[in-house]
Image (cartoon, rainbow, N blue to C red):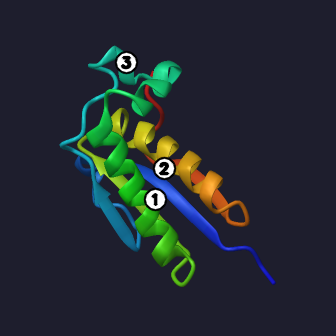
Amino acid sequence: MSRTTVVLMSAGYKYGHPAAGHVFDVTSCPNPRAQAHLRPAQSKALMGGQLSLRLRILAMAVYIRKVGGSEPGVYAICCTGGRDRSPFIVGEVARTLRNRCPKWRIVVRHREGLLE
């Protein structure tokens, strides 16, 4: 039996709509470049003060977990430019799914590149 493969892709709307079966809009989430406590090196901060962002990440992971078993494919997480919010959130969703769905193959792609 083959493993379920789920592709999580970060993308920016200003470069066009992503080719994905499901799209999550995270333009209203905090920008990790503008808020030091959200930068990848300090992503543990999400466990504490950023409860609403953590809940949104968890909600995305729960949705993908529920739908992904029957609809494996590409799930895009998009913001305006695709270099800050969406790559950060894709990483957090991927980590959550890897913990909750260890038999799944989780692939992460960043259409616009990573934040510098």
What is the spatial separation of the Cα atoms under label 1 and label 2, in whole angstroms? 6 Å
Residue 77 x/y as whole percent: 37, 53
What is the spatial separation of the Cα atoms under label 3 and label 1, in whole angstroms? 22 Å
Q: Depth check: 82 or 67 in front?
A: 67
Crowd rating for badge 1 (residues with CA inside 10 Å; few <14, some 14–19, many 20+): many
What residue lies at 47% left-to-right and 54% top-to-bottom?
9
Q: Which quadrant does the N terminus fall into?
A: bottom right
Residue that mark 1 sits on: 61
Q: Quadrant of residue 47?
A: top left
What is the spatial separation of the Cα atoms under label 2 and label 3, in whole angstroms? 18 Å
What residue lies at 35% left-to-right and 15% top-to-bottom?
36
Give, as a three-letter code, the residue at label 3.
His
Residue 19 x/y as whole percent: 40, 67
When the figure is inspected, residue 42 is found, relative to residue 97, above or below; the finding is above
Describe the element under mark 1 as helix, strand or loop: helix
Crowd rating for badge 2 (residues with CA inside 10 Å; few <14, some 14–19, many 20+): many
As drawn, the label of residue 93 is 2
Crowd rating for badge 3 (residues with CA inside 10 Å; few <14, some 14–19, many 20+): some
Query: First in sequence: mark 2 or mark 3?
Result: 3
As drawn, the label of residue 37 is 3
Q: Quadrant of residue 45?
A: top left
Taking 40 as reference, is 99 left or right?
right
**Residue at the extreme front of the image, as rendered:** 48
Give, as a three-letter code, the residue at label 2.
Val
Give, as a three-letter code, the residue at label 1.
Ala
Whether label 1 touches label 2, CB < 8 Å: yes
Describe the element under mark 2 as helix, strand or loop: helix
Query: First in sequence: mark 3 or mark 1?
Result: 3
What residue lies at 52% left-to-right and 19% top-to-bottom?
41
Q: Which quadrant does the C terminus fall into?
A: top left
Whether label 2 touches label 3, CB < 8 Å: no
When the figure is inspected, residue 14 is found, relative to residue 42, above or below; the finding is below
